[in-house]
Image: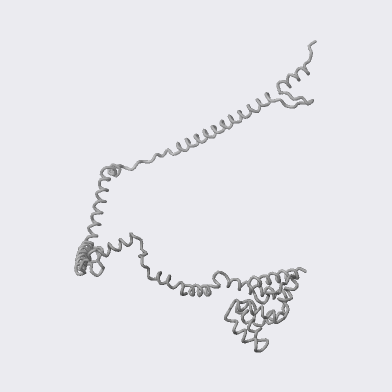
């Protein structure tokens, strides 16, 4: 039952799509029942083959002449050509002749037709009729009525450039042009002076020369810089030695005392003192906590025997009165 309802929905969708695309083979049929639509689209007939051929020609218009020529040949030639076209669209195989002739499962046939119509709708979108629209536009442009307007557009009488651009163009045209010989002489003089400056810089920068042009492996300039740096470092060290280090160098090394047990004893005593201080601190915390507990017992009433709720002093007074021995 579910398969039948799906087939009916696909039949209605394919039939309405054919009507939307203005298929001439479904005009004037006025089918209302889904069962009748399925019978038209899934039953082997010449009308169904013509509908399939029309869909294929809408996808590829150049296929129409070949299909017309194949109608007069063998009966299976048209079906084989449509199967070959379906294989090119990757929707079926060349051996799926039952799908082309209408002998396959209705669900499979309707899905195949739906896929073909999807391709038709994609090719008939905004860019599908660009060639026809372009031809119509060219015919409209080159029509006798529009030809004077086209000629006027190609050869305008007014300058389309803005006023400031036209003024700039006139200013550029009115500038006096210098002779070409003078420009060449100025450029040559500038290049010559630049070359002389570069040669002087190259002579001063010895480290920029190639290895082949250097007189030796070590450059004199680099050696001079290294010697200057070494002299500065030695001078700084000499000043620091004279001001800070000389007194320590000439002094005898200190002698170590053999009384190391004294430091060990002091360390032990300090550790014991720290332990006692920690104990006293913990005792202080415990005392404060105990005082708070006693205060809470004395001030807050509690439930005692016989269901009475009262403080500890009141309970003690009650017990004292109750068990007091009378004097003779």
Give above or below for 80 relative to 289.
Answer: below
- Which residue occupies the foreground of this view, 164 or 193? 164
Placement of the C terminus among the 4 image quadrants? top right
Q: Position of residue 142 (x, y in %)?
A: 46, 74
Is 294 left, or right, of 323 in this rendering?
left
Quarter holding residue 321: top right
Q: How is the image coloured?
A: one colour
As drawn, which residue projects farthest toward the top?
328
Q: Residue at x 62, y 82 (%)?
A: 84
Q: Nearer the viewer, residue 71 or 180?
A: 71
Where does the image place residue 54, in percent across and percent down from the top left?
63, 78
| Image quadrant where one finds the N terminus | bottom right
Q: Position of residue 232 (x, y in %)?
A: 25, 51
Left or right: residue 110 versus residue 253 is right
The one of 192 and 280 positioned closer to us in this rendering: 192
Residue 198 locus on image (x, y percent): 22, 64
Q: Is residue 123 above or below residue 242?
A: below
Query: Residue most toward the front?
Result: 145
Q: Quadrant of residue 242?
A: top left
Residue at 65% across, 88% down: 72
Please tell me which residue lies in front, 133 or 118. Answer: 133
**Measuring 32% from the left and 62% from the top, which residue is drawn there?**
166
């Amino acid at each position: 039952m579910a398969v039948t309802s799906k087939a009916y929905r696909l039949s209605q969708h394919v039939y309405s799509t054919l009507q939307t695309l203005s298929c001439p083979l479904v005009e004037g049929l006025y089918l209302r029942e889904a069962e009748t639509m399925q019978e038209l689209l899934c039953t082997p007939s010449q009308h169904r083959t013509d509908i399939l051929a029309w869909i294929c020609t809408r996808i590829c218009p150049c296929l129409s002449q070949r299909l017309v020529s194949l109608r007069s040949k063998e009966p299976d030639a048209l079906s084989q050509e449509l199967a070959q076209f379906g294989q090119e669209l990757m929707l079926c195989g060349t051996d799926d002749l039952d799908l082309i002739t209408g002998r396959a499962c209705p669900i499979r046939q309707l899905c195949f037709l739906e896929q073909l119509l999807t391709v038709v709708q994609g090719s008939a979108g905004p860019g599908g009729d660009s060639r026809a629209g372009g031809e119509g536009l060219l015919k409209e442009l080159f029509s006798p009525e529009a030809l004077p307007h086209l000629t006027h557009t190609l050869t305008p009488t007014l300058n389309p450039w803005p006023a400031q651009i036209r003024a700039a163009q006139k200013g550029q045209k009115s500038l006096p042009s210098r002779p070409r010989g003078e420009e060449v002489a100025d450029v040559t003089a500038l290049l010559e002076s630049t070359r002389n400056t570069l040669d002087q810089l190259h002579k001063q920068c010895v480290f920029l020369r190639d290895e082949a042009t250097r007189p030796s492996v070590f450059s004199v300039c680099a050696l001079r810089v290294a010697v200057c740096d070494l002299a500065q470092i030695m001078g700084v060290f000499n000043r620091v030695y004279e001001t800070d280090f000389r007194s320590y160098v000439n002094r005898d090394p200190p002698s170590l005392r053999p009384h190391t047990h004294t430091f060990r004893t002091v360390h032990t005593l300090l550790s014991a003192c720290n332990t006692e201080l920690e104990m006293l601190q913990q005792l202080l915390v415990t005392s404060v906590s105990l005082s708070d507990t006693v205060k809470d017992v004395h001030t807050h009433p509690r439930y005692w025997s016989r269901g009475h709720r009262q403080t500890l002093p009141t309970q003690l007074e009650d017990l004292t009165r109750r068990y007091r021995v009378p004097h003779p």
